Amino acid sequence: MIGKRYRRRSAHKGQANDTGTAKRAGTADAEGLVDAYFEAWNDPDPVRRAALLQETVSDEVVFVGPTGRLTGRDQLLDTIVEARELLPGATVARVGSVEVDDGIRLCWEARGPEGKRLAAGCEVINVAADGRIGQIMVALGSDTVL
């Protein structure tokens, strides 16, 4: 499970400390979690997409974006399906590295099959106690063409 990467090991005893906070996760782990989450946005297969979300986001994930607030993995999955229908063939990818503090901060862009940038934005992601994404707050860039 992707989320297990967020279990911090004590330097003294080598025991897992399930704090679930991104602050204690390494940048590489945070990037891995984010990239796996974006794989769910990009995967055309609905079964694989659902499995990727199962691994990367908590059951009660909260997504706050330009279209409002939604709660739960099923609602997030519906949002991804709607976005894929709106932007067929588009892919979403992280731009640059992530910043890890009390949350994971990152920017991303969506490009069409011909490479044209269709959307861009930044997110703050909070990691739940189980190591999966618990909250996603999205701000779209002003040059987004939807």
Image: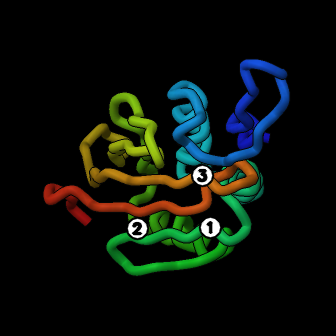
Residue 111 visible, this angle = no
- Seen in the image, is 98 located left or right of residue 126? left
Task: Please tell me which residue is depicted at 35% across the width and 48% down the height of the picture.
Answer: 110
Mark 3 crowd level (few <14, some 14–19, many ≥20, 10 Å Cα): many
Element assignment for label 3: strand
Residue 17 visible, this angle = yes
- Seen in the image, is 109 located left or right of residue 34? left
Mark 1 crowd level (few <14, some 14–19, many ≥20, 10 Å Cα): many
- Seen in the image, is 55 located left or right of residue 91? right
Q: Are marks 2 and 3 in contact (CB under 8 Å)?
A: no
* Position in image of residue 49 (x %, y %): 68, 54
Residue 134 circle label: none
Element assignment for label 2: helix
Q: Residue furthest left?
A: 142
Task: Please tell me which residue is depicted at 34% across the width and 35% down the height of the picture.
Answer: 95
* Position in image of residue 7 (x %, y %): 74, 36
> What is the C-alpha distance between the residues marked 1 and 2?
23 Å
* Position in image of residue 77 (x %, y %): 62, 67
Sequence-earlier tag: 1 or 2: 1
Residue annotated with mark 3: 127
Residue 61 circle label: 1
> What is the C-alpha distance between the residues marked 2 and 3?
28 Å
Question: Marks 1 and 2: which is nearer the front?
Answer: 1
Residue 86 circle label: 2
> What is the C-alpha distance between the residues marked 3 and 1?
10 Å
Kindly identify the amino acid type of the residue bearing the numbered disc 3: Val
